[in-house]
Image (cartoon, rainbow, N blue to C red):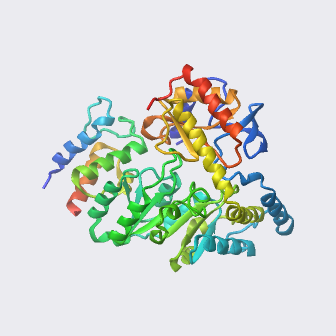
């Protein structure tokens, strides 16, 4: 079973193509610091679905502001699987 | 509060940092015909209107609208569920159901509201909507208004759809797959036969938004499902009157008797005024014209192939297949804006599409042609692109 820190590390990898070289940390705000737009956010979820081989509803984005928020949502879905 | 709007306003201003005409606020000062108007004081060919059958100035449609205005008034002033259903609304629904060979149809006030109305009310809390990633904003907004779980698959990628259905396991029988007949930005079609196969295999439901393909594809103009020979696999047909029918409104047609229950549960149906009498009358007249005059579709496709082939020969990067939507891909919004303004100076209006509406961070000069364009107008549009090609930097294939 993946730990939260494993998932956080993989979340950072998924976001890395959109980070323009910025260091991603748990508290990094996806909109303010990364400038992730709504289309890019959905692309990240598509990639995460492939990496974890699970369905990730777009609905989770409503609860996500930071890298850590996204990692927690992914962890929750992985545990529920 | 308002800071998000200030940021967007500043971003738009940065792109439009001069006094030139704004592609996001162009005003048609006078309409001359389905294909010409006065813009920025200049007689201009309109090549970005989605007026696929050119019926906006059809004498029969105009006469029907005028008669309805005189006989029934300027508006219904009420919701479909209250005082806003006239005999003509019910007749239009019967005519749409008959045209699509379906048990029933429901009319909404716009195509946007039709998608909101269906996607918010058809699937419930335990259901899944699995939509193509390039679906229109109205589909996304309808999903957000409802309570279903929302998943996407990669645009037109049947293998990816298969993977996502497989992951859902037994939930596939509570899943609504949503695709479009022709996608509005690049003009490409859904691989509907293969999607219908998956739908049957997994026991899912299928909704096809034929907004840009109703009246455009199929032997009778019923859309991509008719052309692909898979109408029996489509649970819900969705469409609009604001493209091939030349007016405004939306609808869904289906064999599922449950469609009727939307009239009691769908908030975008319930809580807005119904289409006005002239709108309903011109939609009915245009639906009749669509059936009586198949030559309109032939003219439309002659023009679509004509413009697509000319622009491809000029070396422009276009959408993947010929379609009434001819999308010219540009590298960046600034180049697209300069090209768009230069086209306007030559008397050609097209749509400028910038991110995030344009895919992959690029920019599109989106042309749409119709049956009412003359061969000379198609040549003038192509000629304007040809004249501008050397001095600009269109993205090459």
Considering depth in this image, is B118 or B148 the residue closer to the camera? B118
Considering depth in this image, is B299 or A76 the residue closer to the camera? B299
Q: Quadrant of residue B91?
A: bottom right
Q: Residue B36: in sight, yes or no?
A: yes
Picture residue at 25% right of the left edge, 37% below the top: A25
Where is residue B120? Give x, y as percent: 49, 65
Is residue B32 left or right of B22 when viewed as pictured? right
Identify the residue at the far right of this view: B70
Q: Is residue B98 above or below residue B213?
A: below
Picture residue at 32% right of the left edge, 34% below the top: A19
The N terminus of chain A: image quadrant? bottom left
Q: Is residue B231 above or below residue A53?
A: below
Q: Residue B243: in sight, yes or no?
A: no
Where is residue A53? Give x, y as percent: 23, 55
Q: Quadrant of residue B109?
A: bottom right
Where is residue B228? Give x, y as percent: 48, 62
Where is residue B311? Give x, y as percent: 55, 34
Picture residue at 78% right of the left edge, 31% below the top: B41
The C terminus of chain A: image quadrant? bottom left
């Amino acid at each position: 079973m993946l730990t939260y820190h494993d998932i956080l590390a993989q979340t950072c990898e998924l976001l890395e193509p959109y980070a323009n070289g910025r260091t991603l940390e748990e508290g990094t705000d996806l909109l303010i610091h990364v400038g992730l737009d709504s289309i890019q956010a959905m692309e990240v979820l598509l990639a995460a679905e492939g990496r974890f081989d699970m369905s990730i509803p777009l609905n989770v984005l409503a609860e996500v502001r930071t890298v850590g928020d996204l990692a927690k949502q992914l962890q929750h879905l992985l545990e529920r699987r | 509060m308002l800071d998000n709007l200030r940021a967007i306003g500043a971003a738009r201003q940065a792109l439009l940092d001069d006094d030139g005409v704004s592609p996001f606020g162009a005003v048609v000062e006078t309409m001359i015909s389905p294909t010409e108007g006065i813009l920025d004081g200049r007689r201009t060919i309109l090549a970005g209107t989605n007026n696929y059958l050119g019926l906006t100035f059809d004498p029969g449609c105009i006469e029907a609208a005028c008669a309805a205005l005189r006989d029934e008034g300027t508006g219904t002033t009420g919701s479909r569920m209250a005082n806003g259903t006239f005999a003509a609304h019910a007749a239009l629904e019967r005519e749409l159901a008959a045209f699509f060979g379906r048990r029933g149809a429901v009319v909404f006030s716009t195509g946007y509201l039709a998608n909101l109305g269906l996607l918010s009310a058809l699937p419930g809390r335990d259901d899944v909507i699995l939509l193509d990633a390039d679906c229109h904003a109205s589909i996304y907004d309808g999903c957000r208004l409802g309570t279903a779980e929302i998943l996407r698959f990669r645009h037109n990628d049947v293998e990816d759809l298969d993977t996502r259905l497989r992951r859902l396991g037994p939930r596939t029988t509570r899943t609504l797959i949503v695709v479009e007949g022709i996608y509005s930005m690049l003009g490409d079609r859904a691989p509907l036969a293969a999607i219908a196969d998956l739908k049957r295999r997994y026991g899912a439901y299928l909704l096809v938004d034929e907004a840009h393909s109703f009246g455009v594809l199929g032997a009778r103009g019923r859309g991509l499902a008719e052309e692909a020979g898979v109408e029996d696999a489509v649970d819900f047909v969705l469409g609009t009157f604001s493209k091939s029918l030349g007016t405004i409104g939306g609808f869904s047609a289906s064999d599922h008797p449950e469609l009727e229950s939307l009239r009691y549960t769908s908030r975008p149906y319930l809580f807005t005024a119904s289409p006005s009498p002239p709108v309903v009358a011109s939609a009915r007249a245009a639906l009749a014209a669509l059936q009586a005059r198949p030559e309109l579709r032939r003219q439309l496709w002659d023009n679509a192939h004509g413009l697509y082939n000319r622009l491809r020969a000029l070396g422009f990067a276009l959408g993947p297949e010929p379609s009434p939507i001819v999308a010219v891909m540009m590298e960046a919004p600034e180049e697209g804006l300069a090209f768009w303004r230069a086209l306007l100076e030559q008397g050609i209006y097209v749509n400028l599409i910038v991110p995030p509406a344009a895919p992959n961070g690029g920019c599109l000069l989106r042309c749409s042609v119709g049956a009412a364009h003359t061969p000379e107008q198609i040549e003038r549009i192509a000629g304007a692109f040809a004249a501008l090609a050397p001095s600009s930097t269109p993205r090459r294939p």
